[in-house]
Amino acid sequence: METPAWILVIILSVTLAIFLIVAIILTIKLIKLTKDIRKVVLTGQKIADNVEDVTGDAADMVRNAKKMTTVSGIVASVTDAYSEFKKGKKDGKK
């Protein structure tokens, strides 16, 4: 081979080596980034689950408060409690 061909082969070899090294480094960084993203997603899911539990409890408290602040809600609660009391008393006698 002539000198210009050798120079071209050397330049292309060096360029390929640099490209491969950069590709390996970027692949490793990408793998680390995906692991970090997975951690963030899991943390976000835990937070969302906790918020869902809190809002569910708050919604139950609001529903219960709504029942206890209206006359019909209070009457319904008392009659339910009384019917459960009577039912328990009848089951105890049998």
Image (cartoon, rainbow, N blue to C red):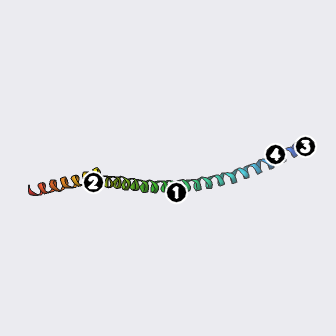
Q: CA distance from mark 3 to mark 1?
A: 58 Å
**Discs 3/4, front:** 4
**Discs 2/1, front:** 2
Of the residues shown, which amino acid type is indicated by label 3? Pro
- Nearer to us in this view, 3 or 55: 55
Image side of residue 72 versus residue 58, left or right? left
> Which numbered disc, 2 or 1, marks the residue that appears first in the sequence?
1
Please rate how many residues cluster around mark 1, counting C-alpha atoms within 10 Å: few if below 14, some from 14 to 19, many from 20: few
- On the image, numbered disc 4 is attached to which residue? 12
What mark, if any, has residue 1 been given in the picture? Answer: none
Residue 11 drawn at (x, y percent): 84, 47
- On the image, numbered disc 3 is attached to which residue? 4
- On the image, numbered disc 2 is attached to which residue? 74
> Which of the 4 quarters of the picture holds residue 86?
bottom left
Q: CA distance from mark 2 to mark 3?
A: 98 Å
> SS of the residue at dot 1?
helix
What mark, if any, has residue 43 been given in the picture? Answer: 1
